[in-house]
Image (cartoon, rainbow, N blue to C red):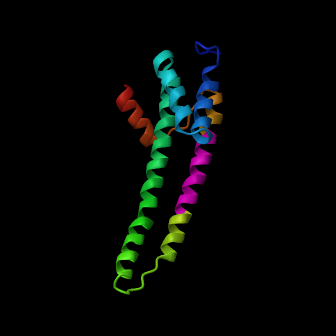
Amino acid sequence: MQKTKLGIPFGLLASAIYFTGLFGGYLVAIVLTAYVLLVEDDEWLRRSSIKAVILMVLFSLIDTVIGFFPDVLGVISSFLGMFSVAFTFNTFSKIIYLLTEILDIVEYILFIALGIKALRRRSLPIPVVDSLIYKYMG
């Protein structure tokens, strides 16, 4: 079993990065990823840590884009309210809420699955993210 320079097995560190990405937030995941990129030489570990950060950013970006639509509809509603025109978007708000909840569930399942796979030094292929990693990391 290969270990990092800290004495931690590679799979355990990669798993920790995935789980901190899910539960600990950006700061811890980025600090651990920076450690891996600066100190460790194992390619699988480097790719796994980058994959965790990319997935975190991707899920945050999707959540932000989905959350943007109710804000735009709120502005339209306020504007039309100035002219005494009633505009409600309750159904659309419920759909947006449903989409964000589904996105959260997918994120939890994906990060937990990746963390468990990483313990055995394996990974789940995610074509979009993997292609970005291979394109920029060689």
Q: Nearer the viewer, residue 87 or 117?
A: 87
Quadrant holding the N terminus: top right
Identify whether 9 is placed above or below 73.
above
Picture residue at 40% right of the left edge, 76% below the top: 77
Q: Nearer the viewer, residue 58 or 127?
A: 58
Residue extending furthest toward the front? 82
Picture residue at 58% right of the left edge, 28% below the top: 14
* Res 88 seen here: yes
Give the total number of marks visible in the rendering. 0
Q: Which x, y percent locates residue 43?
A: 48, 21
Identify whether 32 is placed above or below 6.
below
Identify whether 31 is placed above or below 7.
below
Identify whether 101 is placed above or below 83.
above
* 112 part of magenta stretch: yes
* 106 part of magenta stretch: yes
Q: Nearer the viewer, residue 118 or 37?
A: 37
Q: Which x, y percent locates residue 91?
A: 51, 76
- The magenta stretch is 99-113
